[in-house]
Image (cartoon, rainbow, N blue to C red):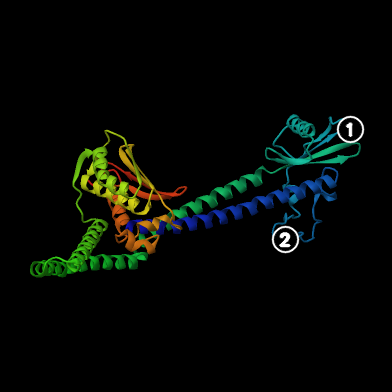
Amino acid sequence: MIKRLQRKFVLIAMGSLLAVMVVLVGAINAVNFVQMDRRADRLLELISQNGGGFPAGGKEPHRGEKPQKEGLLGPGMTEETPFETRYFVVWADGAGQVSQLDTSHIAALSSQEARSLGEEVLASGRTGGYKGSYKYLKTASGSGSMVVFVDCSSQMRTGLFYLAVSCGVAAASFLVVLVLVSVFSRRAVRPVMESLEKQKQFITDAGHEIKTPLAVISANTDVLELESGANQWTESIRNQTARLERLVRDLLALSRMEEGRVALSLSDFSFSDVVAKAAEPFLAPARQRGQTLELAIEPGVSLCGDKGGVRQLVSVLLDNAVKYAGEGGRIQLRAGRRGRGAFLEVANTADNLPEGDLDRLFDRFYRADSSRARATGGYGIGLSIARAIAEAHGGRITARRGEGEIRFLVALRAAGEGPGGRK
């Protein structure tokens, strides 16, 4: 339980950190690429408005003027921008045929390559967009059109490098924090660990202390019956004493299971036969309540595990199903092979399905319908024992709602294969 709580703490902490990092890295790089795109748009508009080049003098803004400020995401033009910008221009006549080229401001491609890009853009009918690392803008020019291409390869490389660096730094930071959280998570859950240890110790001590007065009560009841004969009062004492003894026994067994102090008696056995034999005693009680108990057990399934534990697991689930299926209800038990292990599934109809998180059903003393506690008997720890048995076999147990039914699914691994398995 402590390890599960510790893992959950680490998962929640690292999941939250991962979400924050993804948002931060994504937002920062998105702003960076938006700024690059807006700068390219400003350059295209400026060159297009000046007939395929920068304003007179080849400077923008004029020498000596302060650079124009356009906010956080502004293009950040300076008087050096015309000399830094690599671009070429393609003119077309009214028929859409390339009539003139200007590749004097770029050396990365030949005139033929520039013509080919221009023809592709003219044929596409689009007025703007990207062609590889070039962003273009198509505008009207006289009786024809003009397409300006700006080389964004340098900005793209810088942006991709920044993206890679930011992702690398974020990943390294995530791993460092993961190590730190994993190391210090035990300290974070220490108060819970101490509380659980005290609770388990109290249950163990109280269980042993209660056994003595129970034995005295039982002996005194025997004396009363010998002197006065059995009556409804002595019978009631015996019934309540037996119930209390079962509660103490189950609590001690559950506490030992959760502490890992129970040595499983491992052996290879017929899982199919054990499930079938464990289910037989519930056929009669189900018939008395008008219930239908359907068994679908795959033959020949073997498992390496604790035969007694598996038998108790089946008994707990079927006992729970018979209690809560109601008069005339339907109970289904399925068992078979799954991978190298086995599975067990018990479903029963229910008038009032439990709401909320079904994992709470496996908590000690939890009852979905507390008003039926005395009517159904038991103390609400049967499913806790079932979960402990499943986890001791390296498996898990879950509960699911269906249409008018509740279903318990158990997956059991071969001993030693799962996190809780032992050899």
Q: Amino acid at mark 1?
A: Gly
Q: Residues within 10 Å of mark 2 (few under 14, many from 20)?
A: few
Q: Which residue is mark 2?
A: 71
What x and y, as percent, mark residue 260?
A: 24, 55
Which residue sits furthest right?
143
What x and y, as percent, mark residue 335?
A: 32, 40
In the image, residue 89 above or below residue 183: above
Q: Which residue is mark 1?
A: 94
Q: Which residue shows up at 75% across the image and 48% down it?
A: 41
What x and y, as percent, mark residue 288?
A: 31, 49
Q: Amino acid at mark 2?
A: Gly
When asked about the image quadrant of residue 122, the answer is top right
| Element at label 2 | loop
Q: Which residue shows up at 39% across the image and 58% down it?
A: 360
In the image, residue 204 above or below residue 156: below
**Position of the C terminus by quadrant:** top left
Give left or right: position of 100 versus 253: right
